Image (tube, rainbow, N blue to C red):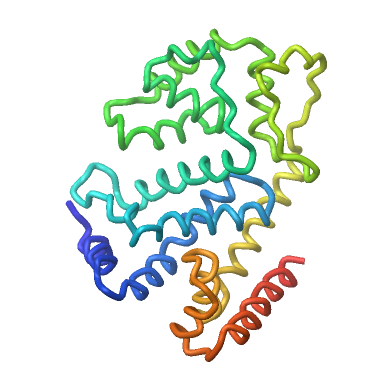
């Protein structure tokens, strides 16, 4: 059954002045979007960039992506939004690092098996998370099928290919964002253990919580400034007219102050 609140919110996106609907959407679903961004990278600044990319793409062309949601469909709006956000994260990551070509050994997989390969081996999702991700488009899929496909895919991959996939899931060093290509596979001779230890994982989770707390704790006017500038890519002059701040220079000073506040809080 369609959720009347979601249906009403989507209808407001079609109005001549959808700003209030966008603000309400961000107030309610920013944690979902930021969680998707944070899952894509362990770097706080990169996660913030990814989050802004998600918001920008959702607002693009008069919220065309959001309006594609079918309230009568099998998935809830939150589940559907999580999938859309994760796909936008992948697009953001590919723009930064380039899109590695799939290994030849997996190019002949069926469409469903290839999606399982992407979720399990490229993105590192658990079997349960993979099932949750794919069930809206494959409602008959179950955990046994996911695990069976995983075994078949693993049989196709060499040990070096599995290592390369693991490397792609690791945060890139600050000095480079390059990925190891299949063509350079022969240069890989030693496979170091680069898995994060428990202490590092806990620190990363704490940073995530702190970042989310600081962003969501901003006053509504400050969040609106960031949303208009970085998510909707409006000019300083247009933001000044919308917010009543007077002129572009004043808007710029306010935005710089908000960014400094966030940076200082995170430090």
| Rendered location of residue 140, percent (x, y) | 27, 26
Q: Determine whether 251 is above or below 113 in the image.
A: below
> In this orientation, which residue lies closer to the viewer: 54 or 33?
54
Against 83, residue 138 (above or below) is: above
Is 244 displayed left or right of 266 in the figure? left
Q: Nearer the viewer, residue 209 or 220?
A: 220
- Quadrant (top left/top right/bottom left/bottom right) for the C terminus: bottom right
Residue in the picture at 50% in, 84% down? 240
Residue 103 falls in which quadrant of the image? top right
Question: Dividing the picture into quarters, in which one does residue 236 lie?
Answer: bottom right
Q: Nearer the viewer, residue 50 or 120?
A: 50
**With respect to residue 83, does 105 lie above or below?**
above
Q: Residue at x 70, y 26 (%)?
A: 180
Q: Is residue 185 left or right of residue 118?
A: right
Instruction: Identify the residue at horizontal 52%, vertical 73% (top origin).
Output: 235
Pick the residue in front: 201 or 178: 178
Residue 231, x across and y down, in percent = 50, 64
Number of disc labels: 0
Where residue 130 appears, x then y in whole percent?
Answer: 45, 32
Residue 36 is left or right of residue 190, and the answer is left
Residue 217: name its quadrant: bottom right
Q: Residue 20: percent from the left, percent from the top?
A: 35, 75
Q: Is residue 138 left or right of residue 53?
A: left
């Amino acid at each position: 059954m369609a959720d009347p609140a979601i249906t009403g919110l989507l209808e407001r996106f079609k109005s001549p002045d959808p700003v209030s609907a966008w603000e309400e959407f961000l107030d309610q679903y920013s944690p979902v979007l930021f969680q998707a961004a944070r899952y894509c990278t362990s770097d706080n600044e990169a996660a913030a960039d990814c989050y802004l990319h998600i918001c920008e793409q959702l607002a693009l062309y008069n919220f065309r992506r959001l309006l594609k949601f079918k309230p009568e469909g099998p998935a809830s709006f939150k589940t559907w939004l999580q999938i859309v956000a994760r796909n936008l994260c992948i697009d953001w990551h590919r723009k930064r690092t380039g899109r590695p070509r799939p290994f030849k050994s997996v190019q002949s997989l069926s469409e469903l098996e290839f999606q399982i390969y992407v979720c399990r081996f490229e993105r590192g999702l658990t079997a349960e998370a993979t099932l949750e991700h794919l069930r809206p488009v494959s409602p008959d899929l179950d955990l046994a099928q996911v695990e069976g496909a995983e075994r078949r895919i693993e049989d196709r991959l060499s040990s070096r290919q599995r290592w390369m996939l693991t490397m792609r899931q690791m945060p890139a060093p600050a000095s480079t964002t390059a990925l190891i290509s299949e063509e350079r596979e022969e240069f890989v001779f030693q496979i170091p253990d680069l898995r994060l230890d428990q202490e590092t994982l806990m620190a990363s989770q704490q940073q995530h919580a702190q970042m989310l707390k600081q962003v969501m704790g901003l006053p509504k006017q400050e969040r609106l400034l960031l949303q208009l500038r970085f998510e909707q890519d409006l000019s300083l002059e247009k933001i000044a007219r919308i917010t009543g701040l007077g002129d572009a220079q004043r808007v710029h000073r306010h935005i710089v102050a908000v960014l400094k506040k966030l940076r200082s809080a995170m430090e």
